Amino acid sequence: MISLQPRAMPSKLMGYLAPLIALGLTLLSGLVLFALLGVPVGEAFHAFFIEPISTPYGLSELGVKATPLILIGVGLSIGFRAQVWNIGAEGQLILGGIFGGAVALYFYEVDAWYVLPLMLIAGVIGGMLWAAIPALLKTHFNANEILTSLMLTYVAGLLLSFLVHGALRDPDGFNFPESRLFHDAALLPIVMEGTRLHIGAVVALFVVVAGWVLLSRTMLGFALKVNGAAPRAGAYAGFSQKRLIWFSLLLTGGLAGLAGLIEVAGPIGQLQPTISPGYGFTAIIVAFLGRLHPIGVLFAGLIMALSYLGGESAQITLNLPVAVTGVFQGLLLFFLLAADVLINFKIVRKVRRQL
Amino acid sequence: MYSKTVLAKKLLAAATGLLLTTFSGIISADDPFKIGFVYVGPVGDHGWTYRHDIGRQAIEAEFGDKVETTFVESVPEGADAERVIRKLASSGHGLIFTTSFGYMNPTVKVAKAFPDVKFEHATGYKRSDNVSTYSGRFYEGRAVLGTIAGMMTKTNTIGYIASFPIPEVVRGINAFTIAMRKVNPDATVKVVWVNSWYDPGKEADAAKALIDQGVDIVTQHTDSPAPLQVAQERGVMGFGQASDMSAFAPDAQLTSIVDNWDAYYVERTRSAMDGSWTSEDTWAGIENGMVDFPEYGAMVPDDVKAAADVIKEGIVDGSLHPFQGPIMDQNGKVVAEEGVTIDDGTLLGMDFYVEGVQGTLPK
């Protein structure tokens, strides 16, 4: 019988190396996979990992794709540190899009500097409000936030669908479910001429730094970590559990809402029945891949974004199926979790005693 | 500030240089003409995307090594579409088909940046000098299905699994219901919205719920064969969607509407290659073969086949229109008087149910 035994002192170094090991093993498996598919391995790797970022435009798209993942990932990693499991970032993202988008549509004819800041504020508030529901249910009724936040995601999706089919629908759009295209004053400024790389990417970098400062340099960050590692110790130290739950959820909700606003005011430019291909869920992988550390999340977000871009480019240049993207992402997570298990546990062979 | 502008300029110059090299690539005469496709679902959905991919293969069969086709599947209708379309345009594709409504604005946007590339957008309404639109008059097919359903139902209740309440889908429900009630005024239609084009699990659940509520025929405006498979299991009947799905449900499929893009795709490719391509709006039906049907199922009796054929022929020779008055909406209000036919403009924005549809239209 093989069984797992907890290690007394899991290696900290290995904890940080695990994502790299997982990445290496994923690449290795990719090698085998491509060889089995009969695709020239070198070409496949080039198409998947190099080609998408070999041009300035490609790099800008990497930034566009990684921005929402990083924004949400930073929020989640802080919440997860405090053992607050917000799984509903996708829903909070959608609410941010709805709130910010509604402001843009309300000021449809207005060409003024204050439209965009108002949208940003509305987006953040939208995400926070949606996250406040699980926070309230958790602190007052001890309802599990994993379930409540996840289920609210579906409510959010239907709410968006309801609005773009009705109140926010483009009056000149033949009843198709989408809003008007936003006015230029309601679109994020582009930071790199000729691309879609918008100011949101800069905001994401700022959030990474702010998240890092919060976790490593402030009392609040310390309280969050202590509370996550040893809740009772936290309680003895006088940290209020409830306040930490509220803070974690509002923070992740606000950042997810910001990500949603940035998507609709950035690359999409209008409200549609779907505004996110699951960024809120992918960001959970990003948070863990980044070791729940804001700087790690930055890199993990870029890697995840690259896997999407690579999937597209592999389809165009090599006619590989889109499923390859999913396989790569799945392998990456699988190896990461496996590495984590081996870092925290050791494998022992138990000899069954004969009676 | 200085270094930033210089950097931006350098990047721009590099990008332009790159574009130029790609463009010079297409000019050489011996290179195959490259055609790109953007799909909303997987090519294996056996419905909407599958049929577009069959159309792509028809281009390859017709032109052989004079063309080269590329497709990108399961592209979300959001921020990602623009990047994929742009990638195809900048990698030497001269003609690009974007095959879902949600690609409309990204297609128009990319088309502006690539005036030499021709774009074809399915089901949209925005055109420009290098963007055409095309779609099928699938409501014509729905009228044929409705006729068969009206004659064959025993419970007088038909289940309709619908994707999103957009005009295209509402139009289909109405055409189906009008034709059904012409042959069976007691029959009604129950609609379930699944809010997805392709979600076999949800589609199957909807089919089960409808059958539990007593419908004996299931029809669908979603892309997977799942509802038909449920119908087969439960011993009721149904219609295929977008392609011939009889292989999935040999005892259940009465007939199917087949989206047949082959001729259109070949034709548009030919005109793009010989330079005669112009921006057009195509909305073709049974007459052009864009809306097609497989063989009737073995369980369809001869009189029903004959009645269905009469509808098909009437639509083709123009003697019959699925939206000929008198037509009443759900509340009994007349929307088209006797002898009046609802015009294309109203059809394109249809947002009400006709009499005979149960429930209210989500808005």
Image: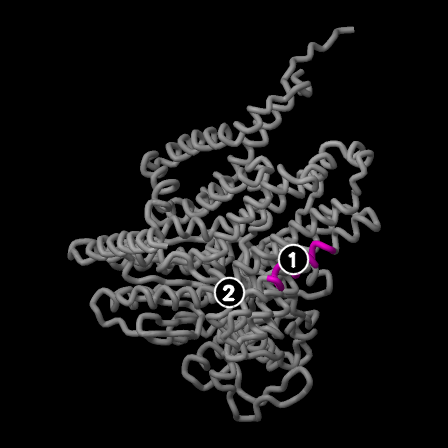
The picture places residue B296, in percent across and down from the top left corner, at 50, 65
Amino acid identity at mark 2: Ser
| Relative to A59, residue B160 above or below | below
Residue under label 2, please give it: B256
Residue B189 visible, this orientation: yes
The image quarter in which residue B218 lies: bottom right
The image quarter in which residue B133 lies: bottom left
The picture places residue B42, in percent across and down from the top left corner, at 47, 52
- Relative side of B152 to B1, left or right: right
Q: What residue is shown at x 30% (from left), y 67% (from top)? A: B268
* Classed neighbour count for the residue bearing mark 2: other residues with Cα under 10 Å, few (<14), some (14–19), many (≥20): many
Amino acid identity at mark 1: Gly
Whether residue B59 appears in magenta in the rendering, the answer is no
The picture places residue A20, in percent across and down from the top left corner, at 49, 30
**Considering depth in this image, is B120 or A96 the residue closer to the camera?**
A96
Mark 1 → mark 2, Cα distance in angstroms: 44 Å
Foreground label between 1 and 2:
1
| Relative to B168, residue B222 above or below | above
Residue under label 1, please give it: A127
Report the span colored magenta.
A121-132
Chain identity of mark 1: A
Residue B66 visible, this orientation: no
| Relative to B87, residue B286 above or below | below
Q: Main secondary structure of the magenta part?
A: helix
Q: What residue is shown at x 27% (from left), y 52% (from top)? A: B14
